[in-house]
Amino acid sequence: MHTGYELSHLAALEAESVHIFREVAATFERPVLLFSGGKDSAVLLHLARQAFWPAPLPFPLLHVDTGHNFDEVIAFRDHTADRTGARLLIAHVQDDIDAGRAVERPGGTRNPLQTTTLLRAIGEHRFDAVFGGARRDEEKARAKERVFSFRNRFGEWDPRAQRPEVWNLYNGRHRAGEHIRVFPLSNWTELDIWEYIDREAVELPSLYYAHRRRVVERDAMLLSATRFVSPAPGERVFETTVRFRTVGDATCTGCVESTADTPAKVIVEVAATRLTERGATRADDRISETGMEDRKREGYF
């Protein structure tokens, strides 16, 4: 009698991500993991710890802090670094604004300014591999990207000059000053992420679950009424029960009305939706049809 061994869908995704982490650790000298405190980076960190357990992480975490983050996310970021013992590096967008390397637009989001700060941090620490939590199902520009995404010495991405990845063989070859962006969650979906969070009991910031919040409706989105977002003339602030599907700069990240206060309830919601989390709740992705791709060419996440 023949008995086969078959991995579940989540186990197969987990195994692929663990393999990618180990491949990078064996190939590169100075990797770093981008950690925003969001759900994808929380899963990314959990997978990285799985890949190297019981040894500590062989690379630090890096957060590019816009200065306009949600308080809950910053608290979760610091708590997670303390809980896991990971070394946390923080690159502040404000430092680049003060130095004149980035120019803030009055009333605008700081999200595009993160590119300058990220590239500065990569150069200062001489990182040659940068783990990110991007997934192909999030947005069409990200759907084009390989697992190992080559960036030139200016941090630029050329979508027409990507390297083939046949049979999950990854090419990390690069010269001094160049680096590779690595995306272990490329083949995961938002539903996969939440099913894994549920299975592994991955800790998240509280704003991912339903809670009462004061919001303002703008451009068909609900933005949290915080010190970073004030109502414009004609807009009203009201309180409702919401949760966040993704986390970014508080000036451009919207929330959705929801009563899902557990991972199991979020899974039911996500399974029924037809909009990706970025398409539904990220105002910075609505700037143009090619907004994300244009920013990625310049060195964005």
Image: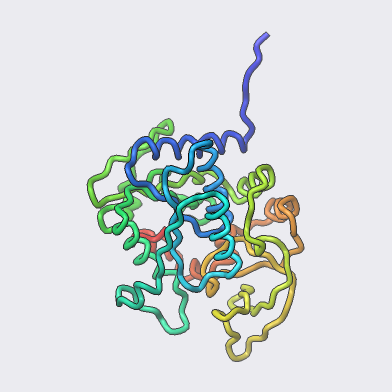
Residue 27, above or below 88: above
The image quadrant of residue 173 is: top left
The image quadrant of residue 282 is: bottom right
Quadrant position of the N terminus in the picture: top right
Q: Residue 136 in the image: x percent, y percent?
A: 50, 49
Residue 125, above or below 8: below
Q: Residue 44 in the image: x percent, y percent?
A: 52, 48
Judge left or right: residue 298 versus residue 216.
left
Give me the residue at 56% from left, 58% from top. Answer: 38
Please identify the residue farthest to the left as the structure is shown: 176
Judge left or right: residue 73 versus residue 209.
left
Quadrant position of the C terminus in the picture: bottom left
Give me the residue at 58% from left, 87% from top. Answer: 232
Residue 56 appears in the rendering: yes
Please identify the residue farthest to the top as the structure is shown: 1
Residue 156 appears in the rendering: no
Give me the residue at 32% from left, 48% from top. Answer: 128
